[in-house]
């Protein structure tokens, strides 16, 4: 099945997170993440796709709310003006994906630093996710429209006796009412602003989930250890006994917010036959 693409709740600089990272928080992947060592994989292990005029692709779909969300995210990152409408244009979307994420994960697991990071997550019972794809927007041009209406009112009170005298009418003595005339005018101010969000910004990440478990060494065969994603550790036994040998096993599984076990409610969009998720 295709890897799940999760829309982040904020834009991230391109160097914040990368392919092959291990993270604990899908919506905040840079926090407490593990960065694979240089040389863990090459450019040949990465598939790159470019979508020119990404805003036109959004317009052709029914994901108007996705378009509005991306506009809002870019606006929040680059402007503090209060606007009533924001639109994206001339945006280039680049998708980078690991070609064979399972084999590359096995190579990452051979690194002592990665093993220690996974063991710590296992002890804390934390969920682990592998970054297998990144979607970015490049040089998005933002158009903002601001509209403000101001209404001015003026009132004139004219005594009734003066109005009647001007018309040649004589009124009897006593209480009289004054008449009033009002004037109202509305002024409309429209403001249009456009600017370019420079550079490449991450707006969505594709994940696969990592299942980390611990077993007795006798339950894991030699072939599993040779793959790299299983390794022996020594843990202290209860009651002050000698350390026992156990095996940590890390497997790549599919990730989908539809499971709901660690993501909460979500909304999905379909863009170019790809389903994107946004956590509510």
Image (spheres, grey):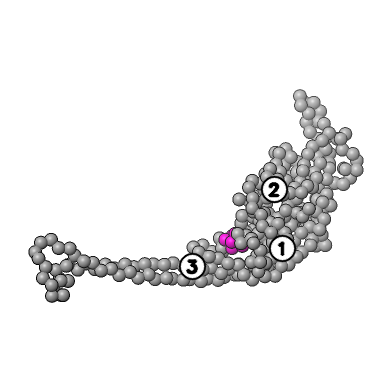
Q: Is residue 131 visible?
A: no
Q: Position of residue 172 (x, y in %)?
A: 9, 65
Q: Which secondary structure lies at badge 2?
A: helix
Label 1: which residue?
Answer: 272
Q: Position of residue 157 (x, y in %)?
A: 21, 67
Q: CA distance from mark 3 to mark 2?
A: 38 Å
Who comes first in sequence, dot 3 or dot 2?
A: 3
Q: Is residue 171 visible?
A: yes
Q: Which residues are magenta?
A: 67-73
Q: CA distance from mark 2 to mark 1?
A: 20 Å
Q: Which secondary structure lies at badge 1?
A: loop
Residue at 41% of width from left, 67% of height from top? 149
Quadrant assignment, res 270: bottom right
Q: In the image, which is nearer the foreground, mark 1 or mark 3?
A: 1
> Is residue 72 part of the magenta span, yes or no?
yes
Label 3: which residue?
Answer: 146
Residue at 71% of width from left, 39% of height from top? 125
Q: Position of residue 166 (x, y in %)?
A: 15, 75
Q: CA distance from mark 1 to mark 3?
A: 31 Å
Disc ID at residue 258: 2
């Amino acid at each position: 099945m295709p890897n799940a693409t999760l829309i982040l709740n904020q834009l991230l600089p391109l160097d914040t997170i990368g392919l092959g990272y291990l993270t604990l928080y899908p919506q905040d992947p840079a926090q407490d993440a593990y960065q694979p060592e240089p040389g863990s994989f090459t450019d040949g292990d990465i598939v790159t796709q470019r979508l020119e005029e990404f805003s036109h692709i959004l317009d052709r779909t029914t994901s108007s709310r996705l378009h509005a969300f991306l506009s809002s995210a870019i606006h929040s990152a680059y402007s503090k003006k209060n606007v009533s409408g924001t639109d994206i244009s001339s945006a280039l979307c680049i998708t980078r994906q690991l070609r064979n994420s399972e084999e590359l994960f096995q190579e990452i697991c051979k690194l002592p630093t990665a093993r220690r990071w996974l063991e710590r997550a296992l002890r804390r019972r934390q969920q682990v996710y592998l970054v297998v794809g990144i979607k970015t927007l490049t040089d998005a041009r933002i158009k903002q429209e601001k509209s403000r209406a101001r209404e001015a009112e003026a009132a004139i009170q004219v005594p009734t006796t003066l109005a009647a005298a001007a018309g040649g009418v004589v009124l009897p003595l006593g209480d009289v009412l004054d008449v009033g005339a009002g004037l109202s005018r509305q002024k409309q101010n429209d403001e249009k602003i456009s600017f370019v969000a420079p550079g490449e910004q991450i707006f969505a990440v594709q994940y696969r989930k990592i299942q980390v478990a611990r077993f007795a060494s006798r339950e894991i065969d030699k072939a599993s250890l040779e793959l790299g994603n299983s390794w022996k550790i020594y843990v202290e036994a209860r009651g002050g006994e000698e350390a026992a040998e156990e095996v940590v096993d890390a497997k790549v599984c599919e990730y989908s917010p539809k499971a709901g076990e660690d993501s909460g409610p979500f909304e999905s969009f379909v863009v170019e036959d790809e389903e994107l998720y946004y956590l509510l």
